[in-house]
Image (spheres, grey):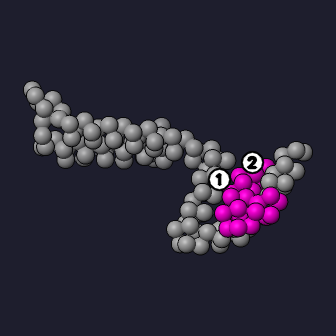
Amino acid sequence: MSMHPTPKRLTTWVIALVICLGLLAVAGTSRGQHGMPGEAEMHFIKLMDQYLNLSDRFVALAGEPVSAAYLAIEGIVEIYENRGEKARAIPHLQRILERQGDDRAIRTLIRFKLRDLYNETGHSDKALEELDRIIEENGR
């Protein structure tokens, strides 16, 4: 058995620690009848449960190469959007597309995102070209 924790196991430990600390933080707040958890504690527990479920799904997605690429593509565009530079995401994604080689799934994801960006920045003709390329590459 390895002495080094896997990233998933480490994430699980960190999340468990956060939950324990959160429960300790609210333990001194309101209590319901007979020492049962109060409304604040139940709300916190529900939020933590939702967070853990979401975290588990994210970790599972990040472990899949195409899903990880999708998350990265979305992250790239989000950064440019937050900067108010949505159009600058286009050449960034085009550079990534050029390096993808024959990975059709990732190329298709990039082309769909390029279609969105072209359409949102007033270049519907280029958006249509991306859709044509998606059909060409996936029809082989």
Q: Is residue 118 magenta?
A: yes
Q: Secondary structure at mark 1?
A: helix
- Label 2 Cα crowd, 10 Å radius (few <14 / some 14-19 / many 20+): some
Contact, mark 2 vs mark 1 (Cβ under 8 Å):
yes
Residue 120: in sight, yes or no?
yes
Residue in the foreground of this view, choosing between 131 and 139 = 131
Q: Residue at x 48, y 47 (%)?
A: 7
Which residues are the magenta region? 102-129
Name the residue carrying label 2. Answer: 105
Dividing the picture into quadrants, the one containing residue 86 is bottom right
Rendering coords of residue 11 (x, y %): 43, 46
Q: CA distance from mark 2 to mark 1?
A: 10 Å
Q: Where is residue 21 drawn, in percent x and y?
A: 25, 46
In the rendered image, the quadrant that contains the C terminus is top right
Residue at which label 1 appears: 69
Tell me the element at label 2.
helix
Q: Position of residue 2 (x, y in %)?
A: 48, 42
**Residue 99 in sight from this viewpoint:** no
Name, please, the residue furthest toward the left.
34
Tell me: 67 left or right of 38.
right
